[in-house]
Image (tube, rainbow, N blue to C red):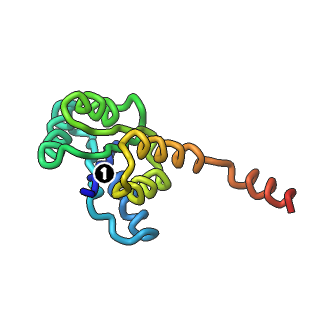
Amino acid sequence: MEMTKILLLTHGEWGQALINSVRMIMGETDGVIAIPLMPEETLNDYYQKVRGELDLNPRALVLTDLFGGTPSNVAARLSQDFPIQVIAGLNAPMLMEAMMTRTLAIDDADRSARIVETGSTSCLNVVNKIKANMRKE
């Protein structure tokens, strides 16, 4: 099965920093591409930059940093022209799940559901979690 390209659409260089961090944990991050929205770019500049990447390989999973922000809105618009999945709320566990599931023989909707679930359940209050685990012992 062809590996799905993963695009990280973020405000600024955060996407590339996240790729670098995940590489420390998982090793190679082939096929994961950060497309930063920089302060000097217009909406149209950014749209064209993302579209150019999708023109090269239209099958992609797009992870954005913030629902309702320019990267998310651009991805939503491009989903009308390209067979892409778009998930907002990017975090490291989501990216790792996306990387681990992109070659599995599951459909895009199931893959997206797994990524959203991983992202949702990875956000927790660490101190409360430790205290709760200590009470169980």
Q: Residue at x 30, y 51 (%)?
A: 6
Residue 33: x, y in percent? Answer: 27, 54
Q: Residues within 10 Å of mark 1 (few under 14, many from 20)?
A: many
Position of 125 relative to 109 (above/below) = below
Residue 68: x, y in percent? Answer: 39, 28
In the image, 43 versus 51, the foreground residue is 51
Q: Is residue 104 left or right of residue 114?
A: left
Q: Which residue is mark 1?
A: 6
In the image, 14 versus 32, the foreground residue is 32
Q: Residue furthest front?
A: 105
Dividing the picture into quadrants, the one containing residue 99 is: bottom left
Q: Quadrant of the C terminus?
A: bottom right
- Total count of labels: 1
Residue 65: x, y in percent? Answer: 40, 42
Q: Is residue 80 left or right of residue 15?
A: left
Callout 1 secondary element = strand
Q: Quadrant of the N terminus?
A: bottom left
Position of 43 relative to 99 (above/below) = above
In the image, 70 versus 87, the foreground residue is 87
Q: Residue at x 42, y 32 (%)?
A: 67
Dividing the picture into quadrants, the one containing residue 23 is: bottom left
Residue 100: x, y in percent? Answer: 41, 59
Q: Residue at x 18, y 43 (%)?
A: 58
Q: Is residue 38 left or right of residue 48?
A: right
Q: Residue at x 74, y 53 (%)?
A: 129
Amino acid type, label 1: Ile
